[in-house]
C-alpha cells in the first residue's frame, strides 16, 4: 500500500503544508462569509484530521482573522491566500481551502465532493447543475 500524501500552499510559496491522511469531508460553502472573504462565489473546503496536517517548518507567516468567535481563518501574510481554518468546536480537525492543494489533487475521500453547504445563501444567479446534495446549513 502506498502512503497517502498531499502537499499544498499559498500562491507565493511562503505557506506550505503536507497532509498524510485523506480528508473526511469536502463541500462547497456558499455562505456569505466565505464569499466575502475570498471574493469567489463559493469556497470549497476539505476537512482533515489535524494529526495528519503539518505546516512546513520555518515558513509559516500566517495571519489569522476570526470571522466569528469560534472560527479562525488563516492567511498567508505575504500573498493573502486563505489556506486553513481552525474551528474551536472541532479541535481534532483542520479545514483546508481545497484549491490550495497542489496540482488540483483530490483530497482523498471516496466521493468527489459531498455537498453544497449553506445553499440558501448562494448568489441567486449562479446555476448549479450537479447532482450533489444541496443543504441549508453545514450538513
Ligand atoms: Zn503566500
Ligand atoms: Zn462558508
Image (tube, rainbow, N blue to C red):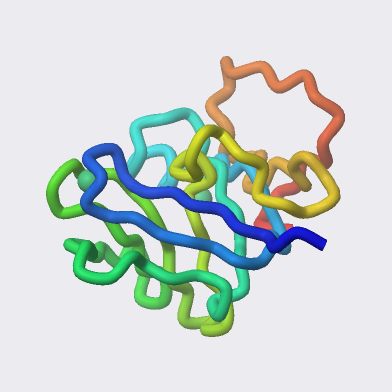
51 lies left or right of 120: left
* Residue at 54% across, 63% down: 19
In the rendered image, which quarter contains the C terminus?
A: bottom right
The residue lying toward the viewer, choosing from 106 and 84, is 106
Residue 95 at least partly seen: yes
Q: Quadrant of residue 77?
A: bottom left
Q: Residue 60's spot in the image, x, y percent? A: 23, 65
- Residue at the farthest left position: 78
In the rendered image, which quarter contains the N terminus?
A: bottom right
Q: Residue 34's spot in the image, x, y percent? A: 43, 45
The residue lying toward the viewer, choosing from 27 and 96, is 96
Instruction: Give above or below for 86 relative to 28.
Output: below
* Residue at 63% across, 47% down: 118
* Residue at 68% across, 60% down: 4
Instruction: Give above or below for 64 relative to 91.
Output: above
* Residue at 58% across, 22% down: 124
Q: Residue 13's spot in the image, x, y percent? A: 26, 45
Amino acid at each position: 500500500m502506498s502512503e497517502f500524501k498531499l502537499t499544498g500552499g499559498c500562491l507565493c510559496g511562503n505557506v506550505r503544508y503536507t497532509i498524510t491522511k485523506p480528508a473526511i469531508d469536502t463541500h462547497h460553502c456558499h455562505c456569505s462569509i466565505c464569499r466575502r472573504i475570498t471574493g469567489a462565489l463559493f469556497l470549497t473546503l476539505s476537512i482533515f484530521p489535524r494529526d495528519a496536517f503539518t505546516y512546513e517548518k520555518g515558513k509559516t507567516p500566517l495571519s489569522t482573522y476570526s470571522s466569528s468567535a469560534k472560527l479562525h481563518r488563516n492567511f498567508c501574510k505575504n500573498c493573502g491566500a486563505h489556506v486553513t481554518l481552525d474551528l474551536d468546536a472541532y479541535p481534532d480537525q483542520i479545514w483546508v481551502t481545497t484549491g490550495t492543494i497542489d496540482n488540483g489533487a483530490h483530497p482523498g475521500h471516496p466521493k468527489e465532493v459531498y455537498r453544497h453547504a449553506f445553499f440558501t445563501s448562494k448568489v441567486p444567479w449562479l446555476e448549479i447543475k450537479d447532482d450533489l446534495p444541496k443543504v441549508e446549513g453545514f450538513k
